[in-house]
Amino acid sequence: MPGDLVIANSDGVIFFPAQHAAEATASAAFTALQDAYDYELNAAGQNGGQLEGGCTPEKYAGLVKWVDARPDKLRRPRAEFIAVITAASQPGGGRGAAGGAAAPHLGR
């Protein structure tokens, strides 16, 4: 449909309805920030056993400080980043047993 978000690669094609495109792109931007933060922690040997996820409130606070020190990494409005990280930090905002960030709902 017009306005749908389409992501395609050699593994397949994913369609996001237009009404979910903003949420999907916000979640993807958040995940990219988390990944960059994790990679930097891993490279510095500071991530312990929390590879690729395992976010705790302390780790989310560290991510906020990391983004504050690297504003060029933030590709979406700061208010949106804070809303997404706040949602992800709430009970039930993570996914699976590791507690990694899910695709947080921004709520409308």
Image: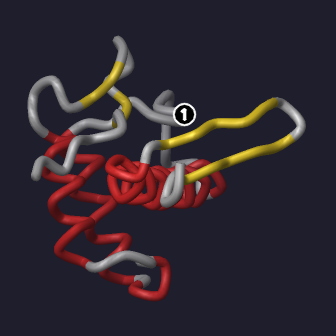
> Residue 77: horizontal and vertical position, in percent?
28, 79
CA neighbours of label 1 inside 10 A, class few (<14), some (14 to 19), many (20+):
some
Q: Depth check: give the residue in front, 18 or 10.
A: 18
Residue at 37% across, 31% down: 100
Left or right: residue 43 versus residue 4 is right
Left or right: residue 93 versus residue 66 is left
Q: Depth check: give the residue in front, 95 or 58.
A: 95
Identify the image quadrant of residue 68.
Answer: bottom left
Identify the image quadrant of residue 57.
Answer: top left
Left or right: residue 12 versus residue 45 is right
Count of residue discs: 1
Q: How is the image coloured?
A: secondary structure
> Residue 20: horizontal and vertical position, in percent?
35, 47
Q: Is residue 100 above or below residue 31?
A: above
Residue at 37% across, 83% down: 69
Residue at 44% across, 44% down: 17
Residue at 26% across, 51% down: 60
Q: Depth check: give the residue in front, 64 or 85.
A: 85
> Residue 85: horizontal and vertical position, in percent?
22, 53
Q: Is residue 54 above or below residue 66?
A: above
> Residue 25: horizontal and vertical position, in percent?
45, 58
Q: Depth check: give the residue in front, 65 or 77.
A: 77
Reading the image, the residue beneath label 1 is: 51
Q: Residue furthest right?
A: 10
